Image (cartoon, rainbow, N blue to C red):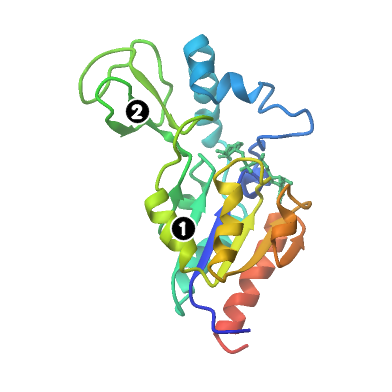
Amino acid sequence: MSKLSNIVILTGAGVSAESGLATFRGADGLWEGHRVEDVASPEGFARDPALVQHFYNLRRAALKTVVPNAAHKAIAELQQRWSAGTVTLITQNVDDLHERAGSPSVLHMHGELLKVRCLRCETVHTWHNDITPDLECMSCKKAGVLRPDIVWFGEMPYLMDDINPALATADLFAAIGTSGNVYPAAGFVREARRFGARTVEINIEPSGVSSAFDEHRIGPASLAVTDWVAELLGDQNGG
Ligand code: NAD
């Protein structure tokens, strides 16, 4: 293998599945019983803000009941111990399990459950509790104008100015627990390949963009990611 310096990792809901957080497209095609267009689109929010706020209030509360699993921990260990170059962690997840596992840097391209955004003054604040109709924006003090700081379908993903250069300089790109159905994230593998990266997919089953990857590691993330990280760190240390 040619010299491996820069690693880019993209994670999706599958990396948090073994912690007990439901993936987006479960067997029923629903997210926690809801059609995704009802709870993850600006149109859904405009139609029924109370339902959408309630949905994310439950997701935010659920974070308090779960802990990072071995896959989150292995990724954090790789970020901490990789000395041959950079490890960029991009996640589509809105949970905070990468941070709690010890990841020093996480690019949340789809936002974060523990942040709220003011529709009036655009300020983003950390928020661990429910968003209620009488809750005031911590900056402009107006009530009823806060929404989850989540990127919904039809909205622009965050941090693309950091993500694109990382993809362009990656030697290795890994997609972990993501279905390859949501763009632009699903296109990252082709982007990284175009710039010469080797690509690996880690998933419990082949994803929708599986054919774009050089290598496939099929298995639950807790095992497959742990093995993959051990191999990378072993190679780095000359093992
Ligand atoms: P997805 O639900 O569309 O796909 C999940 C993928 O994970 C599937 O390919 C599945 O085969 C795989 N998977 C399931 N269990 C696994 C395991 N134990 N080990 C390895 N792989 C496993 O998720 P997505 O591709 O991330 O896209 C969905 C969107 O849903 C994202 O934008 C995200 O913001 C949102 N979402 C986030 C969370 C979260 O933050 N935990 C949870 C649900 C949905």
Tell me what residue is drawn at x 57 percent, y 50 percent: 68
Residue 9: assigned label:
none
Q: Position of residue 50 (x, y in %)?
A: 49, 11
Report the front residue among 56 and 207: 207
Q: Secondary structure at mark 1?
A: loop
Report the front residue among 123 and 54: 123
Q: Please state which amino acid type lies under the numbered disc 1.
A: Gly
**Would the CB of label 1 be found within 8 Å of ligand 1?**
no
- Where ligand 1 lies, by quadrant? top right
Tell me what residue is drawn at x 43 percent, y 22 percent: 130
Residue 140 vertical placement versus 81 (above, below): above
Q: Position of residue 146 (x, y in %)?
A: 35, 20
Q: Which picture quadrant has residue 120?
A: top left
Q: Please state which amino acid type lies under the numbered disc 2.
A: Arg
**Would the CB of label 2 be found within 8 Å of ligand 1?**
no
Residue 102: assigned label:
1
Q: Is residue 123 left or right of residue 110?
A: left
Quarter in which the C terminus is drawn: bottom right
Residue furthest out toward the left: 140
Q: Is residue 143 left or right of residue 165?
A: left
Q: Position of residue 95 (x, y in %)?
A: 51, 40
Residue 165 vertical placement versus 106 (above, below): below
Distance between mark 1 and mark 2 Cα atoms: 25 Å
Quarter in which the N terminus is drawn: bottom right
Report the front residue among 156 and 118: 156
The crowding category of the residue bearing disc 1, from other C-alpha atoms within 10 Å (few below 14, some 14 to 19, many at least 20), is some
Q: Which residue matches tag 2? A: 117
Q: Position of residue 182 (x, y in %)?
A: 61, 40
Of the numbered discs 1 and 2, the one sitting upstream in the chain is 1
Residue furthest out toward the front: 194
Q: Which picture quadrant has residue 149?
A: top left
The crowding category of the residue bearing disc 2, from other C-alpha atoms within 10 Å (few below 14, some 14 to 19, many at least 20), is many
